[in-house]
Image (cartoon, rainbow, N blue to C red):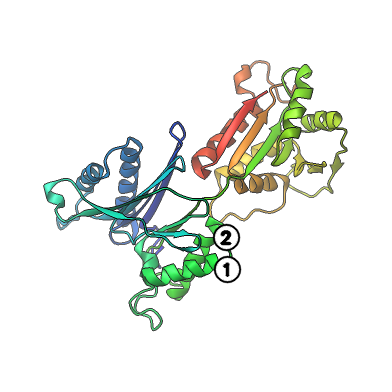
Amino acid sequence: MTAGQIVCGDVFHSRRISGEGRYILILSDGLGHGIRANVLANLTTSMAMNYTSFHTKPEIAADIFMRVLPRSGEGKESYATFTIIEIDNDELVRIINYDNPATQIFRFGKAFVPRELEIPVRGAENKGKILRVREFKPLRGDRIVFMSDGVTQSGLGSKLFPMGWGDGQLAQFIQKQLERQPEITATRLARKIMNQVEMNDQFKMKDDASCGVINFREPREFMLITGPPFYKIKDQDFVRMVKDFPGKKIICGGTTAEIIAREMDLNISIQHHYDWENIPPAAEMEGFEMVTEGILTLGKVEEILENYTSNTRLEDSPPEEVVKLLLEHDVIHILLGMRINRAHHDPEQPFEIQMRKFVVRRIVKILEERFFKKVNLEFI
């Protein structure tokens, strides 16, 4: 954010179209700074997201929302740049860029530049306005770095970068990071870039700056088990599903843990208790990352995810450890047992709104919509 401003003029929106296996990410930079820039960027990202979701041709969509943007008090055209990235089920990436810095793509640690098409924006009043479009099939290990011009223009006027950091020096910086840490996460790479941007501006930002990173890698799978099966006769089948899962797994619920421990002949070891806002302590069991209490822990997990931001720092309480595991993985399998726990069941309420089911569904919704996780929820 520009120094001295309370609102950022850059806006980022993302959406997962689950029925199509499609991901859409949009970054817009509104003209100027502060409230006015934020409004222009918000309008642009919202409309671009909706039109892209409906497969509208980008040159047609751009014409519509460029005409909708409000004009300035002097009657001059209002303006917002945008970058639209569509990922179609990991089989095709489409990058549509209008006046943002060129998106940086890296393959095998080196800059990769797919063929670029120039598509004129529809409409007589948009003469000379060009969309730059790139399409390519991604490979495991590919990185996409997209940004607003506050990144490439950082350091402008300084002795070190009199013309700004620029695309070339940004590309060199990214390549060095990939050489040092080939497996660096998308989050960590984005933070390193933004840290350097702040350093370039001597920690007093001269322009709104945003950076996003996409990393194509093998999905990490994870299982969360909560609640025993509805029918006791299914306990053995349930435990077999858990035992055969190859990835990391946790249990949220004492009764669930007891069933699994009994069927797998395992011991449960309670950890030393700390004061975690009335959250019961976690336990250890061979083959599982952790065992926690059920509904209270899950309720806190939902609360943390709901309020999570890039500035959130997670500690070592049981709910925070669960959140860490959820965010570290890409494909999350949740086994939700439907056996009624009398301690949490209100007989006057319908079965569909039991607390555990409601909380788990909220967690699934947040993971899918905010964190782009693929979640498989199975009722047992």
| 125 displayed left or right of 188 | left
Q: Quadrant of the C terminus?
A: top right
Quarter the N terminus occupies: bottom left
Which sits in the foreground, 241 or 332?
241
Residue 121 position, x and y percent, is 20, 49
- Work out which residue is located at the far bottom of the displayed protein and give it: 159
Distance (Cα) linking label 1 and label 2: 9 Å
Circles 1, 2 touching at the beta carbon (< 8 Å): yes
Give the residue at the far left of this rendering.
Answer: 124
Q: Look at the numbered disc 1 and give the secondary structure of its residue.
A: helix
Residue 49 sits above or below residue 256 on the image: below
The residue labelled by disc 2 is: 184
Does residue 24 show up? no
Q: Is residue 217 left or right of residue 274?
A: left
**Mark 1 = which residue?**
180
Circle 2 sits in a helix, a strand or a loop, which is it? loop
Is residue 65 in view? yes
Q: Of the residues shown, which amino acid type is indicated by label 2? A: Ile
Q: Is residue 256 above or below residue 284?
A: above
- What type is the residue that disc 1 sits on? Arg
Residue drawn at the location 38% of the way across and 71% of the way down: 168
In screen coordinates, is 155 left or right of 229? left
